[in-house]
Image: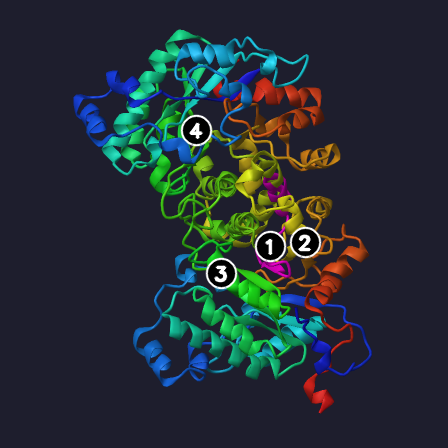
Amino acid sequence: MIDADVHCAPASYRALYPYLSEYWRHYIEEAGVRLTAVEHAYPRGAPTSASPAAREQRGGPVPASYEALREAVLEPRSQRAAPLGAGRPSTPRHVVLNCLTGFETHRNPYFTAAVASALNDWLREEFLARDERLRASLVVSPISTDDAVAEIERVGDDRRFVQVLLPARADLPWGNKNNHRIFAAAREHRLQVAVHAWGRAGKAPTPSGFTTTYLEDYIANQPIAQAQVLSLVAEGVFDRFPELRVVLVECGFAWLPPLLWRFDKDWKGVWREVPWLKRLPSEYVIEHLRFTTAPAHLPDDADAIAQLLEMLPAGKLLTYASDYPHDHGDGLGALLEQLGEEDRKAVLEGNAAALYGLG
Amino acid sequence: MTTVRTEELRAPAQGRSVTLVDCDVHAQPTDQMLAEYLSARARRLLERYGRRTPRITTWYPRARNAGMRVDAWPDKPGHIWGSDPELLRAQLLDEFGVDYAILEVLSGQDCYDEADFAAEWNRAVNDWQRERWLDFDERLLGSIAVAHEYPDLAVAEIERRAGDPRFVAVLMPSSAAEPLGARKYWPIYEAAAACGRPVAFHTGGYVDHRGAGYPSFYLEYHVGNGIVMQSQLAGMVASGMFEAIPGLRVVLTECGVAWAAALRWSLDRAWELMRDDLPKLRRRPSEYIREHVWFTTQPIEEPEDPRQLVAALSQAQLEDRLLFASDYPHWDFDSPTQALPRAMSPQLRQAILCENALALYGLPRERPGELEERG
């Protein structure tokens, strides 16, 4: 089993001080900048932000050290961590770490770039250097293509970084031509790209504007991810970078079939607008996009899930993620029940192994 | 709640039953046509200063036939697509035997205007609609255009039209200054429910919210109309507006439909985990959608295997909630004879083409006659 999405984050900016210049250490101290800006996305009390077991972990639900990660995910002592049910692997062969800290909401591009570099250095020292099972997403500035490319150049040769981490909520959709240099740099370093739920905040946090409840905000990652799918395909990213795979992380997947039915239909009408596309949009999606299994927001009954799976090639598209410490309900178990043995293996391990070269 | 009784207006004309209702047809005035209905002050503002925001069609030029059916331009000076009732009657009502066509005039949707101007502008849209269209052919029904950013003025306009049963709906955009579930807009919904009209949220408006950033192409914008509506519908349910206004019925128009099932699943699953975040809801989110929300067909999703569309409608419990729409005269016009796949049962086709709309709008089953025939 390969777990394609486990969260970690430093407990505070102090953990990053060894990797930040004196200027930025003073900036943080003077301005009282705190690493809590991700709380709009994962409010402490919300049931989705941490599973009951994760809440019992010393030091908080989000692992801030290798020891905490080992205890919670890699070698859990409690049987809680048989998330896939009896007879299935309970500990992952590999784990992909995603470090979300909320820095991606900052407007200062210089600070954003400095923190991205510090986070990557911290990931290397605290986690990657200490356990061969660990892989990580490479943190980059989401507001400066130059800085994102520079960071990929700086650490992208380290094979333990498997993908570039981009937030789903962006100032500019990721497929936009102004972002293509990020994909070029990623492929030069044999990295894939992850688009993870949440991200930029501001005037338009969702397609309908501001939300007044957390539930709306939480759900909104799914329509926002759909817009990123349209952008990546329509802008010809996969024509320019045929080896690129993009993983949508923590954005759901049950919404995909109707989106592709509409996308293909519209493209047949207005293909002139995007002359670089050589195939149906859905064919690009099937070949180049992958989706983590969390959240598995699925229908109540097994027959309806089976019906959904006839529309969605799950064995090709999905890749298992515990999304530790987040808790999106028990949809994953119901999904795995409906998959054939071959598809189940692909979802639990094979797809991630192929994606990240973890053969 | 008053029920609209269109039959009051119409004698049972030819004794033939209604078989086809088109729930999204675009009549479109030029600014000059509307100017006739404006006060001197508003006309002067329009002529000297224009309107405040560039139309969305200039952001995303329609990549096919300028967005219209190529044959939809009348051969008449001063006319544009959708401005000539005679052409629409020939190309839509007569050609396909449409018994009722519900007009949605979008002229007031994609602009922010000063309050008094906005109210006048929408009143002009409705006057033009009534005089040039509803009085022209009995098969044509109207939607009340409102200055949605000024709910008190919008309510006044709804009340002004409520006595005319030919106006069968209240028209809103799919994107507005605030999310459509915001309390700001509730007075509009209350007024619509009070006079028995559904609120039709039509794709478009001043699309300034994105979440993922602004896309580059009409292709993304157009497919994205369904994405925006998903976000809006989630917000409407979460806002508690369906609990607060039990008589409210909404029609999500020109935004696709097959996505409804996945949205229901995600809302229900999230609600099971966090129902205390939405204390106003007393039932599962999907139940509010089931009870209060209708969809129009065009542009309906087209899977390679049409049976999957039927399955998707069933998953979302939309068999009695889906309304046929041609979207005349837009480029992606759907013919009523070809738009619905054969995988649909005859009963489902009949429900979509006719029955669901008759029930929603309270329309008489007898086919309306044309005015000239009745003298």
Chain letter of mark 3 equals B
Q: CA distance from mark 4 to mark 2?
A: 41 Å
Quickly name the residue at label 4.
Answer: A193
**Where does the magenta region start and end?**
B242-267
Q: Amino acid at mark 1?
A: Phe
Q: CA distance from mark 3 to mark 1?
A: 13 Å
Q: Amino acid at mark 4?
A: Val
The numbered disc on residue B185 is: 3
Percent x, y of residue B198: 62, 64
Q: Is residue B73 above or below residue B61?
A: below
Provide the secondary structure element on which disc 4 rests.
strand
Quickly name the residue at label 1.
Answer: B242
Quickly name the residue at label 2.
Answer: B291
Q: Nearer the viewer, mark 4 or mark 2?
A: 2
Q: Nearer the viewer, mark 3 or mark 4?
A: 3
User: Which is more N-terminal, label 3 or label 2?
Assistant: 3
Percent x, y of residue A210: 43, 48
Q: Amino acid at mark 2?
A: Glu
